[in-house]
Image (tube, rainbow, N blue to C red):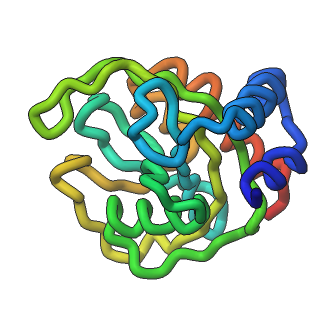
Amino acid sequence: MELARQIAAYTPVNEQEARDKKLLLSWLESGQDIYTRDNDAAHLTASAWVVSPDRQQVLMVYHNIYNSWSWMGGHADGDRDLLGVARREVMEESGLNELKLLSPDLFSLEILTVDGHIKRGSYVSSHLHLNVTYLFEADPKQPLTVKPDENSGVAWFPVPELSQRVTEPWFLKWIYSKLCDKVIQSGL
């Protein structure tokens, strides 16, 4: 299984990633269907961290369900090509036409809690997103478009402004700060 191999080869950068790597591999080995949302407890998602060529800005969307600026990504929904899922979600959620993958390797991994919410008129119970993240680059001069059924804003933000824009403290501390640091440390 390609994803299991990628996760097994991934080197965690902190305790969060080390623990989540172990749990992700356990879920993949469980034999449960985690590639579709039929698994109400946990399913695979892919996210994208999109940076400007000078690495000073990050592309974010204003997520309608969570009322916060956030990264882009989505559910695998049966697709085993999670890199393709991440790329497609960025293009759908932001309207970008040109997107450069900076590395085919996983950029980060995380298990994310999702609180119960209403989506398309139906209640979705709290569950886990078993997430992998890929790093992309895009030109901030490209036109952006909102995807009204998911977000109500798309914008580039200077990295130091993220703490003023993101209203989900856990994401800011554990995920977005980690991703910003990793961009600098990776030299990509």
Q: Quadrant of residue 34?
A: top right
158 to the left or right of 94: right
Towards the viewer: 83 or 48: 83
Image position of 15 (left or right of 24): right
Q: Position of residue 100 (x, y in %)?
A: 60, 76
> Which residue shows up at 42% across the image and 40% down it?
70
**Residue plotted at (25% across, 32% down):** 65
Q: Is residue 73 visible?
A: no
Q: Quadrant of the C terminus?
A: bottom right
91 sits to left or right of 48: left
- In this orientation, which residue lies closer to the viewer: 13 or 35? 35
Q: Is residue 131 above or below residue 139?
A: above
| Residue 136 vertical placement versus 76 (above, below) | below
Q: Quarter-wise, where is residue 156 in the image?
A: bottom left
Q: In the image, residue 154 lies at what x, y percent?
A: 32, 55
Tally of numbered discs: 0
Q: Which residue does the image show at 22% across and 58% down from the upper left? A: 147
Is residue 89 positioned above or below 164 on the image? below
Query: What residue is at 17 percent from the left and 50 percent from the top?
Result: 149
Does the rendering let one see residue 177? yes
Q: Position of residue 150 (x, y in %)?
A: 24, 48
Of residues 184 and 146, the one nearer the viewer is: 146
Place of residue 158 in the rendered image (x, y in percent of width and height, measured from the top left): 52, 49
